[in-house]
Image (tube, helix red, strand yellow):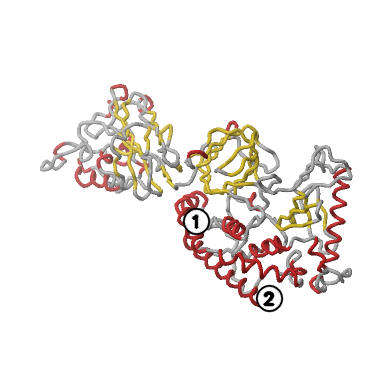
């Protein structure tokens, strides 16, 4: 909120309006007039009724032993509109009062500094405030505040213009600035006093992270996760020098299921041309994860770290950025690779437009109870929701499945039926699937047990309950070799929330059959012994804590505490990270103990 104060306030920012006008009462005592006991910022203009006008105010009414100022005793000039609403002093003939309708003095800010600002690496930030005051001279002075208020500011040397360029910061932190504009009347404004306007406080965060700028045409808001907004531009600033780029053309839309309904939105990007981002292989498709369900911001990142430790075929990669959308700071985001079929991502055969109806391709499968893709089916025994994510050459422009697509889908369904018959050999209609006998070991010719073991390691250690539904569980099916692999891993928003003393996912998806298989249990032990010693949660999590601390604090200033699924409020970012680290270290021990007991 803009403050309008007498010029005397400029000399001492610490003096409040209450103390200023109390000083008037104490030292004026003019003619026995009665003044209000206190004056607020918005009540600085007084009316005739605030004074006793029966007696004249003279110099004799004032204490002649002390030096007088305009603030102490105004005896010869009219009060300004900030003090008496253009009312003359009591020793002035009321017949000489000027019509207030013809003498209006109302300086206002026409531009306030942006409230939240990101300072990219090696760059300053320009803050601007502008005042409109016709017929006046205007001077500016910028101040730095230590606490985000205007109570105790320190003048910034040589910052005396309407615009102010901050230093190039080298120490992470959140810095605060405001401006005082002094309005100096001239002959055009009449007999009024100099006043000062105090701007809003602007915060500037230096997080040491790259900054991603996105501008949509005419700053149109992103309100749909179905409709792409085309001709947007993105720029990456403050990353490694070779990674920075400016105004790359892209389309953008919302993404996610439940996360799309949160205040802080996740987004999908589709570049007009393939491009590398932050050193990652070139592609058109990228995502911005808001991590709104995660007050640590690092649950997904830590799961991806685990997947790389276990050397899964491909794991999404990316890094954290500060997002500025249409000129407004939007918070801390993870910018990274979308799960797409590509030689440098999910490397499977995607088919081609010349395929005949009796030819097959490979499939990127998502098991998700949202069941919202055009090409999908439910498995016959386990009733798992299979959705085909790479549906090229299977649907038409209206998202209707083609004859060739239907033929390919039916052949895939038949293969999944054969697989489930191997996994649940004595299943009968209506029986409890968990009660089935051990699977026919020939299932190992279809399921790649290495990848399924690693997929279980990551999700079990992370305590990812999404697998139980299932939601966001990705697999690939190699049609030529008739092999189903697990991965890539994705979506750990609901992970590591509670303490479990035993594994929780041994009965999810196909694991209720796999953990009855001697071949699978032996592979779990073998791979655990090979990889688990490389897990170093302490180093990874503490590194991420240090990297994100300022960015997380600034994000919380914008969005407040995130909607953590645990529903448990913790004191701050560090407290959430402490809890998360405790959970994953504890669960790592649980998994290790369980595997050591596996026969």
Q: Which mark is residue 598?
A: 2
Q: Earlier in the sequence, mark 2 or mark 1?
A: 1
Q: Residue furthest left?
A: 65
Where residue 250 appears, x then y in whole percent?
Answer: 62, 35
Distance (Cα) linking label 2 and label 1: 34 Å
Task: Say whether residue 502 is left or right of residue 543.
Answer: right
Q: Nearer the viewer, residue 29 or 589?
A: 589
Assign the N terminus to one quadrant of the image: top left
User: Can residue 36 be seen at all in this image of the molecule?
Assistant: yes
Assign the C terminus to one quadrant of the image: bottom right
Q: Residues within 10 Å of mark 1 (few under 14, many from 20)?
A: some
Q: Which mark is residue 544?
A: 1
Task: Count all numbered tags in the image, as a single digit.
Answer: 2
Q: Residue at x 29, y 27 (%)?
A: 185
Q: Which mark is residue 432?
A: none
Q: Nearer the viewer, residue 175 or 26?
A: 175
Name the secondary structure under disc 2.
loop
Q: Nearer the viewer, residue 530 or 569?
A: 530
Q: Residue at x 68, y 51 (%)?
A: 257
Where residue 534 appears, x then y in whole percent?
Answer: 56, 64
Number of the front mark, 2 or 1:
2
């Amino acid at each position: 909120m803009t403050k309008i104060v007498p010029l005397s306030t400029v000399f001492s920012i610490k003096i409040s309006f209450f103390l200023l006008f109390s000083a008037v009462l104490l030292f004026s005592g003019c003619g026995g007039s009665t003044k209000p006991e206190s004056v607020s910022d918005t009540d600085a203009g007084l009316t005739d009724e605030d004074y006793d006008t029966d007696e004249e105010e003279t110099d004799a009414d004032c204490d002649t032993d002390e030096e007088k100022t305009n603030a102490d005793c105004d005896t010869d000039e009219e009060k300004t509109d900030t003090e008496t609403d253009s009312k003359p002093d009591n020793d002035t003939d009321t017949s000489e009062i000027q019509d207030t309708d013809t003498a209006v003095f109302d300086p206002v800010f026409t531009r306030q500094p942006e409230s939240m600002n990101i300072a990219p690496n090696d760059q300053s930030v320009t803050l601007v405030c502008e005042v409109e005051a016709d017929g006046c001279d205007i001077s500016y002075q910028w101040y730095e505040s230590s606490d985000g208020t205007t109570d105790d500011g320190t003048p910034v040397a040589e910052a005396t213009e309407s615009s102010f360029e901050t230093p190039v910061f080298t120490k992470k932190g959140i810095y605060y600035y405001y401006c005082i504009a002094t309005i100096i009347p001239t002959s055009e404004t009449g007999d009024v006093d100099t006043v000062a306007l105090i701007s809003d406080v602007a915060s500037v965060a230096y997080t040491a992270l790259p900054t991603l700028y996105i501008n949509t045409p005419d700053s149109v808001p992103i309100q749909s996760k179905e409709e792409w907004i085309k001709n947007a531009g993105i720029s990456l600033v403050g990353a490694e020098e070779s990674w920075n780029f400016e105004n790359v053309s892209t389309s953008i839309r919302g993404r996610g299921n439940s996360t799309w309904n949160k205040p802080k939105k996740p987004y999908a990007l589709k570049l007009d041309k393939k491009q590398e981002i932050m050193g990652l292989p070139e592609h058109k498709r990228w995502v911005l994860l808001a991590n709104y369900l995660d007050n640590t911001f690092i649950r997904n990142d830590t799961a991806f770290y685990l997947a790389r430790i276990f050397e899964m075929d491909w794991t999404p990669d990316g890094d954290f950025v500060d997002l500025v959308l249409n000129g407004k700071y939007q918070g801390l985001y993870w910018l990274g690779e979308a799960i797409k079929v590509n030689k440098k991502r999910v490397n499977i055969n995607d088919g081609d437009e010349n395929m005949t109806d009796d030819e097959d391709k490979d499939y990127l499968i998502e098991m998700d109870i949202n069941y919202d893709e055009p090409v999908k089916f439910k498995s016959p025994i386990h009733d798992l929701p299979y959705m085909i994510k790479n549906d090229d050459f299977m649907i038409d422009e209206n998202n209707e499945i083609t004859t060739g697509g239907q033929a390919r889908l039916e052949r895939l369904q038949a293969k999944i039926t054969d697989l489930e018959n191997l996994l649940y050999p004595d299943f009968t209609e209506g029986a409890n699937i968990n009660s089935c006998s051990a699977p026919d070991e020939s299932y190992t010719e279809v399921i790649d047990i290495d990848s399924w073991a690693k997929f279980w390691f990551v999700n079990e250690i992370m305590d990812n309950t999404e697998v139980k539904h299932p939601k966001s569980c990705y697999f690939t099916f190699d049609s030529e070799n008739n092999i189903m692999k697990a991965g890539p891993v994705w979506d750990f928003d609901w992970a590591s929330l509670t303490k479990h003393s035993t594994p929780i996912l041994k009965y999810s998806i196909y694991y209720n059959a796999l953990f009855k298989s001697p071949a699978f249990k032996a592979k779990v032990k073998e791979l655990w012994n090979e990889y688990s010693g490389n897990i170093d949660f302490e180093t990874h999590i503490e590194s991420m804590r240090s990297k994100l601390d300022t960015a997380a604090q600034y994000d919380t200033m914008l969005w407040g505490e995130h909607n953590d699924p645990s529903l448990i409020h913790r004191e701050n970012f560090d407290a959430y990270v402490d809890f998360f680290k405790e959970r994953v270290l504890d669960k790592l021990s649980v998994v290790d103990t369980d595997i050591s007991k596996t026969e």
